[in-house]
Image (tube, grey):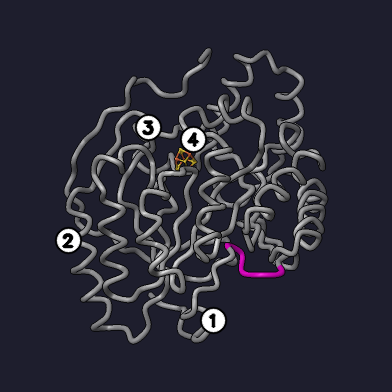
């Protein structure tokens, strides 16, 4: 590993007591449906170079992993409280800011305990992960297949790219296997090609390989998003590309991103023309492979042929007007 964007090896582990766990999901400049989120951990052992979650707990996100050991107790209390003041419980998203099935879950089982509580309350949930660790709980999810969903992030089939950009994640083969096993149990599955790295994994052949591999294994939905840059994300990527002597790529990234017109909040977006080309191509691929299609945080919902994140759990379908909550 020539260049590291973390300082501790191995990652430190801290057991913490959280005060709250269940939160409304608010993406201020997105078209996302409202939902609730939980993050059983803060920090992530997968240490992806481009990780958007690093604004949490910055700058320790990759160095200290916080395990919310009281999360199941807090969740149980918060569900009871929420139910008293709301007649509708939206699906719970596990976990947008860290990976809930990262290796530490094998030791602590916090995610599993939270899922058991959600199931006991008949609350729908969906999980996004880069790990095949979800297979450990396959039976648990399978008994609840009408109310849950598994989503894997698979942006490229290139193992060299994975090792460089997502160095501590399970292999792509293992993620595909997990997706296939969930589909075989009739658990709805989706995949995220997110973030697409411009000029690295955006060629038509590369994108089609990923879409075909996931569709063949039973996924029903594709969500896509192209890399966005925040200040600290760019400083990691820039240092990494410099270390790799990728001067040409650095130049192309600077040209593609750093124009104030492409800024939304604290993120720099790639040029719209570039995004439209990639999204349009992926939308056609989704059609070819009979997948519903959604874009994430692109501000271009006209491309969507399904929910942005693919989540069609029954309460969202049945009672869409009650999604709003404060
Ligand atoms: S798996 Fe997700 S949360 Fe974990 S480091 Fe990678 S991008 Fe961040």
Residue tagged 2: 73
Pointer 3 or 4: first along the chain: 3
Q: Residue at x 34, y 58 (%)?
A: 38
Residue tagged 3: 59
Res 317 label = 1
Query: How many residues crowd around disc 3 within 10 Å: few (fewer than 14), some, or many (20 or more)?
Result: few
State which quadrant residue 287 falls in.
Answer: bottom right
x and y, in percent, of residue 264 in the image: 61, 52
x and y, in percent, of residue 255 in the image: 76, 33
Q: Residue at x 49, y 43 (%)?
A: 130
**Alpha-carbon distance for marks 3 and 4?**
24 Å
**Alpha-carbon distance for marks 1 and 4?**
33 Å
Marks 1 and 4: CB-CB under 8 Å?
Answer: no
Confirm whether the magenta stretch covers residue 6. Answer: no
State which quadrant residue 89 falls in.
Answer: bottom left
The range drawn in magenta is: 305-309
Rendered view: 143 above or below 52: below
Rendered view: 24 above or below 266: below
């Amino acid at each position: 590993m020539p260049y590291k964007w973390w300082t501790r090896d191995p990652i430190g582990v801290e057991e913490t007591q959280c005060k709250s766990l269940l939160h409304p999901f608010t993406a201020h400049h997105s078209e996302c449906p409202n939902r609730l989120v939980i993050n059983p951990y803060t920090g992530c052992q997968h240490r992806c170079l481009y990780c958007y979650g690093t604004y949490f707990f910055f700058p320790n996100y990759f160095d200290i992993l916080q395990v919310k050991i009281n999360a199941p107790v807090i969740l149980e209390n918060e569900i009871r409280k929420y139910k008293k003041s709301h007649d509708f419980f939206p699906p719970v998203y596990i976990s947008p800011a860290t990976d809930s099935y990262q290796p530490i879950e094998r030791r602590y089982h916090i995610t599993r305990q939270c899922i058991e509580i959600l199931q006991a309350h008949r609350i729908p949930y969906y999980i996004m992960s880069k790990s095949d660790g979800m297979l450990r709980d396959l039976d648990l999810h399978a008994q609840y297949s009408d109310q849950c969903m598994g989503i894997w992030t698979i942006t490229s089939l290139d193992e060299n790219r994975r090792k460089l950009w997502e160095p501590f994640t399970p292999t792509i083969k293992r993620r595909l296997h997990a997706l296939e096993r969930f589909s075989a149990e009739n658990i709805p599955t989706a995949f995220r090609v997110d973030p697409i790295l411009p000029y690295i994994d955006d060629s038509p052949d590369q994108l089609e390989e990923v879409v075909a591999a996931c569709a063949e294994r039973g996924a029903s939905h594709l969500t896509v998003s192209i890399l966005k840059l925040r200040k600290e994300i760019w400083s990691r990527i820039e240092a990494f590309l410099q270390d790799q002597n990728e001067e040409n790529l650095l130049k192309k990234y600077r040209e593609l991103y750093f124009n104030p017109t492409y800024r939304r909040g604290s993120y720099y977006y790639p040029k719209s023309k570039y995004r439209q080309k990639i999204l349009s191509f992926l939308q056609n691929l989704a059609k070819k492979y009979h997948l519903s299609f959604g874009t994430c945080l692109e501000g271009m919902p006209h491309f969507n042929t399904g929910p942005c994140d693919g989540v069609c759990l029954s309460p969202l379908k049945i009672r869409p007007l009650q999604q709003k909550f404060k």
